[in-house]
Structure formats: C-alpha cells, structure tokens
Image: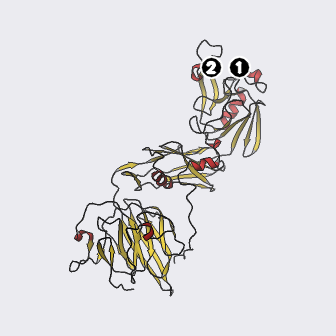
Amino acid sequence: MSAAPAAARIRTWGTASVATAALLMAAAYSPGTDTASAHPAYAPPPQADSLLTASAPRQDQAPLGDRELCRGEKAGVARTCLISHPSAATWTVPMSEGRKAVDRPVALAGPLALTMRANGHITDVSVTGSGGERLGGHLSADGRTWRSTWAVPAGFRYRATVRTETLSGAPAVSTLSFRTAAPQGSRLTAEFGPEAGTYGVGQPVTAYLSRAVPASRAAARARIERALQVSSAPAVDGAWHWVDDRTLHYRPRAFWPAHAEITVRSALAGVNIGDGVYGAGSEPLTIRTGDRIEAITDASDHTMTVLRNGEEIRTIPVTTGKPGYRTRNGIKTVLAKERQVRMRGEGIGIARGSSDYFDLKVNFATRVTWSGEYVHAAPWSAGSHGVENVSHGCTGMSTSDAEWFFDLVRPGDIVQVINSEGEDMTPFDNGYGDWNVSWKKWRKGSTVHAKNKVPAAPRLAPMA
C-alpha cells in the first residue's frame, strides 16, 4: 500500500504522513474518549491518507534542533517526524503498512493509543516488550481506538502490530518498533512476603515499598497497585489493601483454596510513579498453601475444635483469658512456632511482685499475635481445662494436646476465638487480622480495585 504525502500539524510544528496508518497517544487517559476530547490542545485535522494514528503523552525534553527531530528532510521540509517538538504535549510517529522503526528513544508519560483516522476499524492489536511481556489494552466502543490499560514503562523496547480493515473489507497490517527513554529519577521497589514456602490458607501476601506513597497521591498508588500482580491456581477473586503509606496486603474474598499456588510479580520496572520517581524491578514470589487447618476456640464452652479441610479431627479442652485478661475475639493466623518460650508478666504490663505476676518456661507455643498471645501447653492449670478461663489471654491446654497442635499447624493457619468477652482482634497492628475486615471494607482500601473494570468493546479478530 503506497502513501501519499499530506500535511498535518502538531501545535506549531508541521509533519508529513508517509503512510496509510499512524499512531496517536493521548496525553491524558480517559477510557472511551477520543484523543481530541482528551487533549483539547492537540486536535490534528483528519487526513484522507491516514487510516491510523499512534501517540502518547511525553515528558518534557531538552529542546532539540529540527534536524535532530526528524530525518528524511528535503528542502527544509520534514518528511518523517520521529519525536514531536519539545513544546508539544504528544509524541507522534507515522507508521506505514509493513514495518517501521524509531531509533531515537522517546520519553513517554502515559498510556499508548492507536486510533483509526479514516472509515474502518481495528481488528487486532499486539504490543509486546523486548522480554515478551504484553501491553494490555482495549478498544473503544466504535472499534476505532485502542488504548493501553496502563502507562508505557520507560527503558524498554516495544513492537506494536496493528491490523485494520476498511469499510470495503480491505485489510492492512502495520508494525512499529520503538524504545522508551531510560527512567530519570529516584527508584521505587516492592519487596514481597512472606518468604517462599508452604503456608496456611489464611496467609496474606504482603508488599513493602522502598518509598512512602501517601494516600493523597491516589494516581501514584493506582500505578503501583496495577503493577503488583497476583495470580493463583486455582484462581480466586482478590484485592490489594493499603495498610499504610509503604505497606500493602493482598487477600482473596475468602481464604485461599487448599493446595493452591500463588505467584506475585512486579511490573513496576520503568513505570512513572510521579514526582520524579520510577518503579524498578523486584524479585517475584511463589508460595503454596497446604491443607485448610482451622482451630476454633469457644471461650464460653472452654473447647477448641480443630478441622482439616472442613472435617473435625479433634476437640481439645482449653482455658482462655480470665477477667481483666480476656482473649481477643476474631480470626487470627499462626505467625510462628516456638518449642519453648519464656513468658513473664512484664510482657503484658504486670509488675514483679503482683499477685498476677508470672515467669514461666512454656512448651509447644504457637504464636498468633505479636503482643504475645499463644496457643500453648499449660500443665499448671490442668484442672481448669474445659472448665473455666484462668489464663492471662493465651489459650492453654495439656502438654500432649499442645504438642499435637504444634506439630499440626504451620504459619498462615487459621486460629479463631468466639464467645470471649475480650476485645476484637485488630486487622494489621498485632499480626494478621486481615480476615476480620469485611470484603466491602477491604476493597475500599484498594485504590483501583472497584474501578478496575474493562469497558465493553468490540471483539477483536484472531491473529493469523
């Protein structure tokens, strides 16, 4: 397919089309809107010979001479523009049927848009990075504009392959290769937790950021959240929740399935977070879950019922917190196991010399809060097991039962207390109390989860 020269103007600087296709990137992203409405300052006139336009918002660049901006000059007229004028808000490059490459790196700061400029529609789009990663996106309702879902990361090479079809059914395929400029500025990374291994079905996934991102920076938080990708087999519905400015937790609506594989990856590398900060790569994480182990303690009945995959396997007589030291109600998860731990009254504010003071070596201690709540052996209170609550907040049982429980559970297993007169387990400051937050409230702690819905779009034709 041949191209007829036609003049187009980006703000105050002219370019000439060399193709029946061009790519257009919008400087501000708004799904379902066309480029002109998203960018009132940028409104190129329609071109009869331009079926497609590709563009993206670009960052401020140092002023460049005209000869550096374009190649193929003839008598002072730019034939092919590689990078827009520094005063323009949008980077533009024409793309002819076949293959075209832009060698000069371009500094982009937003999502990529591919727009059909004449009558017809886009039938398929594929944008891949040099590592094989795909840049996801969607079509507008009229089938004439494709936009990437997220901003284009910096420091990568990309190839965009676009298939179009005119009203008469004539197909065309255009490919554009380009690279984005290396990120300039500070870096932000995410460290995932817990460590690789096998956990209980109540184990949340965590992400610790190297820099604080306050709630007032909602756009930055959204970019980060979208780049932290969690998948599981079998698949479940889940969401991130911002615990504080540097910490996120991820959990499903309900507990993880038993014997699931959960993988966490970061796509932050090259992502413009804002305020001069760019994302950097992070090590991926894979964890697995074991059997679904649940220990449900009824403080009023003085029993703990243990279930494996929904079936009861043991009921244990226990004692929980006495008045003034009531055991916390709610869902906790196992944090750690200590075969022997020394417990002293000072740890919970009891002064030495008080009648409530204690100093004990405790065996088979399963920790469920950072403040010192355990499930453990308590042979000194054997007469109260199954009868009354006499502990300082822990769940005590016989040595043999405590050893059995200690050997059974692993970090992430569920330990729930019901019918206690104590306070409720807090969500984040004393262990993993994440499951005490309703799903509705959990989603509100996500910057994007409720909004991250792909609008309806025409079905793309399969690539041959």
Circle 2 Cα neighbour tier, 10 Å, few/some/many (<14 / 14–19 / ≥20): few
| Label 2 or label 1, whichever comes before in sequence order | 2
Residue 104 sits in quarter: bottom left
Q: CA distance from mark 2 to mark 1?
A: 10 Å
Q: Nearer the viewer, residue 360 or 117?
A: 117
Where residue 449 sits: x, y (%)?
A: 56, 54
Identify the residue at the far front of this view. Answer: 40
Q: Please determine whether, in this image, residue 6 is positioned above or below residue 251.
A: below
| Three-letter code, disc 2 | Leu
Residue 9 sits in quarter: bottom left
Where residue 315 sits: x, y (%)?
A: 77, 35
Marks 2 and 1 close (CB-CB < 8 Å): yes
In the picture of the structure, the residue carrying the numbered disc 1 is 380
| Three-letter code, disc 1 | Trp
- Name the residue: 44% across, 72% down: 114
Q: Is residue 302 left or right of residue 409?
A: right
In the picture of the structure, the residue carrying the numbered disc 2 is 360
Identify the residue at the far top of this view. Answer: 353
Identify the residue at the far bottom of this view. Answer: 168
Q: Please determine whether, in this image, residue 24 is positioned above or below residue 390.
A: below
Q: How many marks?
A: 2
Helix, strand or loop at mark 1? helix
Where residue 216 sits: x, y (%)?
A: 46, 47
Q: Is residue 214 left or right of residue 329?
A: left
Residue 94 sits in quarter: bottom left
Q: Please determine whether, in this image, residue 426 is positioned above or below residue 78.
A: above
Q: Is residue 349 left or right of residue 390?
A: left
